[in-house]
Image (spheres, helix red, strand yellow):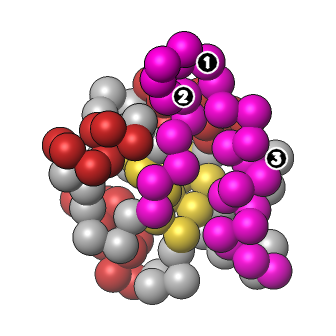
């Protein structure tokens, strides 16, 4: 897992358009606070109980399709959720912001 600063994440998305861009904040944050263009919402945890999403990895794998080496970029507000979600991933090329 590699941690990126916002400028490097933007560069990655521009240079590798196949990158899967995942916003792992809650659905409410994604919908009402806003989200980056092109980001898919797959909450790491969500209300009302705020427990870890047991389907997170499976949903990301489904979004990635059959491209096993496809880069995946995770974002959240503080970096805590994206880091935890990145640790749960067993595939290649996870980056967090």
State the residue at coordinates (62%, 53%): 94
Q: Label 1: how many residues lie within 10 Å, few (<14), some (14-19) or many (20+)?
A: few
Circle on res. 51: 1
Q: Label 2: how many residues lie within 10 Å, few (<14), some (14-19) or many (20+)?
A: some
Residue beneath label 2, please? Answer: 45
Rendered location of residue 18, percent (x, y): 54, 83
Rendered location of residue 49, percent (x, y): 54, 14
Rendered location of residue 65, percent (x, y): 74, 77
Q: Which residues are magenta?
A: 40-66
Q: Kindly indicate the quadrant of the structure image that contains residue 29.
A: top left
Q: Nearer the viewer, mark 3 or mark 2?
A: 2
Rendered location of residue 91, percent (x, y): 79, 55
Choose the circle earlier in sequence order: 2 or 1.
2
Circle on res. 90: 3
Cβ–Cβ under 8 Å for marks 2 and 1:
yes
The count of marks equals: 3
The outermost residue toward the top is: 49
Label 2 vs label 1: CA separation?
A: 5 Å
Q: Is residue 23 left or right of residue 62?
A: left
Check residue 94 for magenta coloring: no
The outermost residue toward the front is: 48
């Amino acid at each position: 897992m590699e941690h990126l600063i916002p400028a490097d994440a933007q560069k990655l998305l521009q240079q590798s358009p196949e990158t899967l861009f995942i916003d792992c904040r809650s659905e409410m944050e994604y919908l009402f606070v806003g989200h980056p263009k092109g980001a898919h919402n797959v909450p790491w945890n969500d209300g009302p109980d705020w427990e870890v999403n047991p389907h997170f990895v499976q949903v990301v794998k489904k979004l990635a399709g059959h491209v096993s080496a496809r880069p995946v970029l995770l974002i959240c507000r503080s970096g805590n959720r994206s880091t935890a979600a990145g640790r749960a991933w067993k595939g290649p090329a996870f980056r967090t912001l």
